[in-house]
């Protein structure tokens, strides 16, 4: 049985542990809620994490990091980008997948090192893609904040009659 077959066979356990690792970065109350509530509308964050991690694992294992895989990753990272996480906290769960796979599937010496290297490389590529997505969303957030500050300052200057319209 190949490593990929083993991973696919144990996918539910891997996804559950990977989700647990992702949720470790949240406070205990939030973590409990994200795990317990499975309704998409009552718990959109937990639902998105569980759904997208399951799909993303399949893409990573198969080495198929296409637009659909990017979309799964984007759904997760978009949530993490608006929260108060450092980049390493926001995307660190990607690299911890290696640890989960080794724990669930077996120890390093029982696994084919070539297959393991391929899976590790796919995880690294997905992690780098996650960082690109995180950076893009953080940049958008900062651009929105700068625009808001500019509008506020402009309004304040207009109210104080310190700003006048410049004819074109």
Image (cartoon, rainbow, N blue to C red):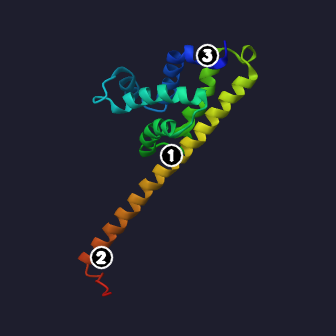
Q: Which residue is the extreme one toward the left?
A: 159
Which residue shows up at 51% across the image and 46% down it? 133
Q: Which residue is mark 2?
A: 157
Q: Is residue 24 visible?
A: no
Of the numbered discs 2 and 1, the one sitting upstream in the chain is 1
Mark 3 crowd level (few <14, some 14–19, many ≥20, 10 Å Cα)? few
Residue 58, compared with residue 158, is above or below; it is above
For the residues bearing labels 1 and 3, Cβ distance under 8 angstroms: no
In the image, taking residue 119 as reference, residue 22 lies left or right, namely left
Residue that numbered label 3 is attached to = 5
Residue 47: quadrant of the picture: top left
User: Nearest the camera: 27 or 150?
Assistant: 150
> In the drawing, what numbered circle is on residue 85?
none
Instruction: Residue at 28%, 30% (x, y): give it.
Output: 41
Q: Residue at x 57, y 41 (%)?
A: 88
| Residue 99 makes an appearance in the image | yes
Residue 120 or 165: which is nearer the viewer? Answer: 120
- Compute the Cα span from label 2 to label 3: 65 Å
């Amino acid at each position: 049985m190949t490593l990929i077959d083993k991973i696919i066979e144990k996918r539910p356990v891997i996804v559950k542990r990977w989700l647990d690792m992702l949720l470790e970065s949240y406070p205990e109350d939030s973590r409990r809620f994200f795990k317990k509530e499975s309704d998409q509308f009552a718990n959109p964050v937990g639902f998105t994490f569980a759904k997208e991690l399951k799909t993303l694992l399949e893409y990573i294992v198969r080495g198929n990091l296409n637009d659909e895989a990017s979309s799964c990753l984007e759904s997760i990272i978009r949530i993490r980008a608006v929260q108060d996480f450092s980049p390493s906290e926001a995307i660190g769960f990607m690299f911890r997948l290696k640890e989960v796979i080794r724990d669930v599937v077996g120890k390093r010496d029982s696994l084919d090192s070539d297959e393991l290297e391929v899976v590790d490389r796919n995880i690294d590529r997905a992690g780098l893609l996650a960082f690109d997505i995180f950076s893009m969303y953080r940049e958008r957030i900062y651009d929105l904040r700068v625009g808001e500050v500019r509008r506020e300052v402009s309004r304040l200057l207009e109210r104080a009659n310190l700003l006048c319209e410049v004819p074109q």
